[in-house]
Amino acid sequence: MKFCFWLLAITIFYVYFGYPLSLLIIRKIRSVPILQKDNLTPSISMIIPAYNEEKSIGQKIKNSLCLDYPKDKLEIIIVSDGSTDGTNEIVKKFNNENVKLITFETNQGKSAAENAAMKIATGEIFVFSDATGLYNQNALKDLVRPFADSSVGCVVGLVKYENDNTSSVSGGEGLYWKYETFLRRLESEVGNLAMASGSIMACRRFFVETLDEAVGEDFVIPMKAAKKGYLTVFELSAISMESMVEKSRDLLRTKIRIITKDLRGLFLCKSILNFFRYPLYAWALISHKLLRWLVPYFLIALFAINLFLLNSIFYFFALILQLSFYAMALIGYLVRRKIMTLWILSGPFSFCLVNAAALIGFAKFLIGKKAGRWVPVRK
């Protein structure tokens, strides 16, 4: 039991601290330089799925049309995925040849919408975006600069949240996202990034295939790029501003859907976990994703084993430490509707919420349940 306790404890420590430390060490030894050109302007197709986005789609189109990029090199494709509000009418008001509208009669899901857009897209580069993500002025120019390097297949921008410290929910998620951004930056610098953000991701069109409707493009496309020998680069100067989900229930549901989709995507691209063919990517995906999705199971086992080791003062205090952490998470949950910037509460709460989502998402994947229809959570 002691052996199992320490094996679980070390594994959990490795997932959150050992893996980032390993990346820092590798960066000292092996950093991958990327050729970039400021004057690169390939033709771009910006793909924006939208489901009942009447509150944000107009602002999104205006933001896209005002970006600093040659107008004759940019097309914007809005796919209204069975919208029942005023989304379609708002898009039609933009009498601009650069804006195209595809409408679905019924809601078919985000990947289905993106597949429809890719069929008519003419750009050399596809840029996948969300209806709520507002780009900074030079975002597109910054996104395409790394494509000057022929080894680059995908470029990922930075997602920033305007409300990342207004409650225990957004505060905890803000901490989590800062940690995730730090990890992705390190992975990019060592040439080992294999995931993206759906709000701002660019890729070469020629290796993008039809997406399975139960997977996410921001996870599958970078993996497909890696399988074909291309790098995914994290470009921090290309920024998409978003609003973070404020309700814990909505955040939990969103994360469950994402984890279930990503697990299915990893299963469909499981050959990338072959250490002999893709040693670095396999290590990164197992460390960054697969083991992290298993952490809630490790935590449950660690707690259960700890109950049988209470005859030792060390293991008694180890149990007290776990109970204290979960108590702080519970307090963070209880005060989630109030302004709470204390990381000592929002951190544990966010950690437990993310792991609850992983527990449910992994279980749903194992029993064969798909993620379900894409229904964005909006204010």
Image (cartoon, rainbow, N blue to C red):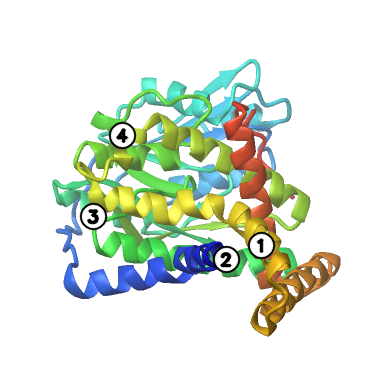
Q: Are marks 2 and 1 in contact (CB under 8 Å)?
A: yes
Separation (CA) of disc 1 from disc 3: 52 Å
The structure residue drawn at horizontal position 36% and vertical position 37%, both measured from the top left corner, is 221
Which sits earlier in the primary sequence, circle 1 or circle 3? Answer: 3
Q: Is residue 300 left or right of residue 183?
A: right
Q: Quadrant of residue 372?
A: top right
Q: Which residue is mark 2?
A: 5
Q: Kindly identify which residue carries mark 4.
A: 271
Q: Which label lies toward us, 1 or 3?
A: 1
The residue nearer to you, when weighing 43 against 119, is 119
Which of pointers 3 and 2 indicates the residue nearer the eye? 2
The amino acid type, in three-letter code, at marker 2 is Phe
Task: Identify which amino acid the numbered label 3 is placed on.
Answer: Arg
Q: On the image, numbered disc 3 is attached to which residue?
A: 145
- The numbered disc on residue 116 is none
Query: Label 1, on which residue?
Result: 305
The single residue placed furthest to the top in the displayed view is 105
The answer to whether 359 is drawn above or below residue 121 in the figure is below
Residue 121 x/y as whole percent: 35, 26
How far is the residue under mark 2 from the one under mark 4?
32 Å
